[in-house]
Image (cartoon, helix red, strand yellow):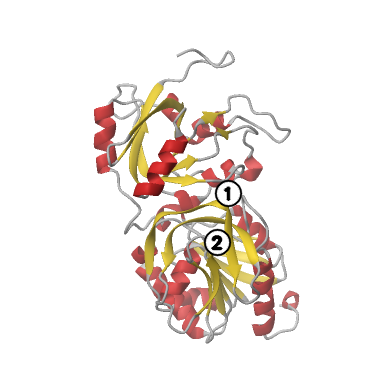
């Protein structure tokens, strides 16, 4: 293959889905320069293939810990145009397994750019494949659902076997791979919030940090330990994997809800875990919601919000019992928000912090503040 604008040629690569579908492309990122354990110089990367429809914000998507175990296909054809910079990282490193793009820009143009996306991937050891017919791939995943895949410079037979052995996210606890090991503090707002880290994003911490001093704790922190910190509010973050695999975490959230003394706000996986603690069931969507333009109706007002979403699992309709559904997805009717009539707890399936995406739903952080105001025993949290 010839070089691109004087750049060295990319090695040819293949992407193979678990059902045998094959896509041709070129290796980028770590796949273009790494070697597998056999020392042959070929590479194999595997994971669950999903697609994301955002037009920009690819760096925030790649560094979102909710993508642990997954290979992200970008439906927008040109990715990497404005490069990458350390400010836009949602986590210290990416947890996704790899990326698939149609056209990866070699020479970014933006005043904020510090490196090309290819260099960013290589620096973090993330493999990618470019030159793929992502329209055909996306149509295939929409028709047949998210599924395991493998890609790289290895032989087609090796990739077929790797795709066959690759695990989907079903039944997997991926939170343990992304959560913090020790508590840490962020923000300088007047309230005190304890945030469970199931894969928390920097944009969430920025929004919460304007309201509160946040103590971020590991995912398995006992409820009694959280309550002993005397928080004004408790936050349940986003994160990867199957909520049904997190029974121990659900039991601790149930204890927090039953205590009924501290407001709880959940987003994405936090929403699914809160719903589970309230007795609801969850299920896996065929290909998930991954993008920045999902219409959600706020049932209380009838207002339609355009939202950023990234989830593979959802709360089953009719399983919520006494809890009230507050938001629904207008594309497919998925439950997008809930509130308990018996405790100061609420959650949404989508991302009001929107990194990337629209800001229509950022009022939810103000609702969290109002709920903390209503339950705080002292008039001014700063006085504590």
Whether residue 208 sits left or right of residue 258 in the image: it is right
| Location of residue 17 with respect to 372 vertically, above or below | above
Query: In the shown orientation, is residue 324 left or right of residue 314?
Result: right
Out of 70 and 35, give the one closest to the viewer. 70
Q: Taking the image as drawn, is residue 92 in sight?
A: no
Q: Which residue is mark 1?
A: 90
Residue ID for mark 2: 350
Q: Disc 2 on helix, strand or loop?
A: loop
Q: Nearer the viewer, residue 317 or 49?
A: 317
Instruction: Tell me if residue 365 comes above or below residue 254 in the rendering.
Output: above
Q: Position of residue 347 (x, y in %)?
A: 54, 71
Image side of residue 245 versus residue 101, left or right: left
Q: Judge whether 177 appears above or below 276 on screen.
A: above
Residue 95, above or below 268: above
> Which quadrant of the view contains residue 383?
bottom right
Find out whether the residues at labels 1 and 2 contact each other: C-beta distance under 8 Å: no
Q: Earlier in the sequence, mark 1 or mark 2?
A: 1
- Residue at 71% from the left image edge and 84% from the top image edge: 378
Picture coordinates of residue 26 (x, y %)? 43, 25
Q: Quadrant of the N terminus?
A: top left
Could you classify mark 2 by the number of other residues whose Cα lies within 10 Å: few (under 14), some (14-19), or many (20 or more)? many
Measured as percent of width and height from the top left, residue 287 is found at 41, 52
Q: CA distance from mark 1 to mark 2?
A: 16 Å
In the image shown, does 303 or 264 lie closer to the viewer?
303
């Amino acid at each position: 293959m010839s070089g691109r604008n004087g750049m060295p040629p990319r090695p040819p690569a293949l992407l193979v889905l678990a059902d045998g579908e094959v896509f041709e492309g070129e290796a980028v990122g770590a796949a273009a320069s790494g070697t597998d354990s056999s020392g042959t110089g070929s590479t194999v990367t595997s994971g669950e293939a999903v697609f994301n429809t955002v037009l920009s914000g690819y760096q925030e998507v790649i560094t979102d810990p909710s993508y642990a175990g997954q290979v992200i296909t970008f439906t927008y054809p040109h990715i990497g145009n404005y490069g990458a910079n350390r400010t836009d990282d949602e986590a210290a490193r990416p947890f996704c397994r790899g990326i698939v793009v149609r056209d990866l820009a070699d020479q970014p143009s933006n005043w904020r750019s510090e490196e090309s996306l290819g260099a960013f991937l290589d620096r973090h050891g993330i493999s990618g494949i470019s030159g793929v017919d992502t329209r055909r791939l996306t149509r295939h995943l929409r028709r047949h659902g998210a599924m395991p895949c493998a890609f790289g410079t290895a032989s087609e037979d090796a990739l077929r076997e790797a795709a066959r052995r690759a695990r989907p996210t079903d039944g997997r606890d991926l939170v343990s791979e992304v959560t913090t090991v020790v508590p840490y503090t962020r923000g300088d707002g007047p309230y005190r919030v304890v945030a469970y880290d199931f894969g928390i994003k920097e944009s969430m911490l920025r929004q919460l940090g304007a309201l509160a001093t946040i103590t971020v704790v590991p995912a398995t922190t006992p409820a009694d330990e959280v309550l002993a910190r005397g928080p004004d509010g408790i936050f349940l973050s986003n994160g990867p994997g199957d909520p049904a695999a997190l029974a121990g975490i659900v039991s601790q959230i149930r204890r927090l809800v039953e205590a009924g003394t501290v407001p709880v706000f959940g987003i994405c996986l936090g929403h699914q875990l809160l719903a589970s603690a309230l007795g609801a069931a969850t299920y896996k969507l065929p290909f998930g919601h991954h993008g920045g333009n999902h219409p959600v109706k706020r049932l209380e007002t009838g207002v339609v919000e355009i939202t950023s979403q990234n989830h593979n699992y959802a709360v089953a309709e009719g399983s919520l019992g006494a809890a009230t559904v507050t938001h629904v997805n207008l594309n497919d009717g998925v439950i997008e928000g809930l509130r308990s009539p018996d405790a100061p707890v609420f959650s949404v399936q989508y991302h009001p912090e929107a990194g990337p995406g629209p800001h229509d739903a950022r009022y939810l952080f103000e609702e969290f503040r109002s709920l903390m105001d209503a339950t705080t025993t002292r008039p001014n949290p700063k006085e504590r």
